[in-house]
Structures are given as structure tokens and as C-alpha cells.
Image (cartoon, helix red, strand yellow):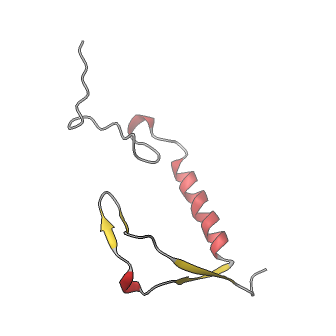
Amino acid sequence: MLYCYCPQIISDLAFLTFGGGPRKCVGDQFALMESTIALAMLLRKFDVELKGSPESVELVTGATIHTKNGLWCKLKKRSDVL
């Protein structure tokens, strides 16, 4: 039997973070929740302020929506956090 790879028909999901289909990572939801909790615990200790104006942020669309030049922020340690 002859097999050929045709990207228009078959999608191997190789470039997705946790994959997909029958070989999808079983721990993907746990990993996403864990990273969300870690970020929340870190941000509890800081005040976050946008470095420029909101109007200066340029969005780029593609497979995802992201900023053109990043999202520059200032972090200030909160004094009221233990």
C-alpha cells in the first residue's frame, strides 16, 4: 500500500503546543491550569502598569492575536503583601 503525505488533507498537529488527535497530551489541561495559578501567585505580589499608552499597542492577527512589539509593563512590588 502506498502512503503519501498531503498537507491539504492530513494535519499532523505538530506545531500545536500540546498536539491533538489520538496522540494529544493527556496532561494539557493540568499544565495550563498550573501555569495560570503560578502566574496569579506571582502577580499577587506586584502592581502591573502599562508602560506606554493603550493606543500605542499594535495587534497582529494570524493563527493567534498578539502584539506587534510585545506588551511592555512596569512591575512595582506591593508593600501590603506578606
Residue depicted at 30% across the width and 38% down the height: 11
Task: Count up the numbered dots.
Answer: 0
**In the rendered image of this protein, does residue 8 appear above or below residue 82?**
above
Left or right: residue 24 versus residue 43 is: left
**In the rendered image of this protein, does residue 35 appear above or below residue 59?**
above
> Considering the image in quadrants, where does the N terminus appear?
top left
* Residue 81 x %, y %: 75, 82
> Considering the image in quadrants, where does the C terminus appear?
bottom right
Outermost residue toward the front?
69
Question: Looking at the image, which is closer to me, 17 or 61?
Answer: 61
* Residue 64 x %, y %: 35, 60
Residue depicted at 75% across the width and 87% down the height: 80
Outermost residue toward the top?
1
* Residue 43 x %, y %: 63, 74
Image quadrant where residue 14 sits: top left
Image quadrant where residue 62 sits: bottom left
Question: Looking at the image, which is closer to me, 74 or 44?
Answer: 74
Residue depicted at 57% across the width and 64% down the height: 36
Outermost residue toward the left?
8
Residue depicted at 57% across the width and 52% down the height: 30
* Residue 75 x %, y %: 62, 80
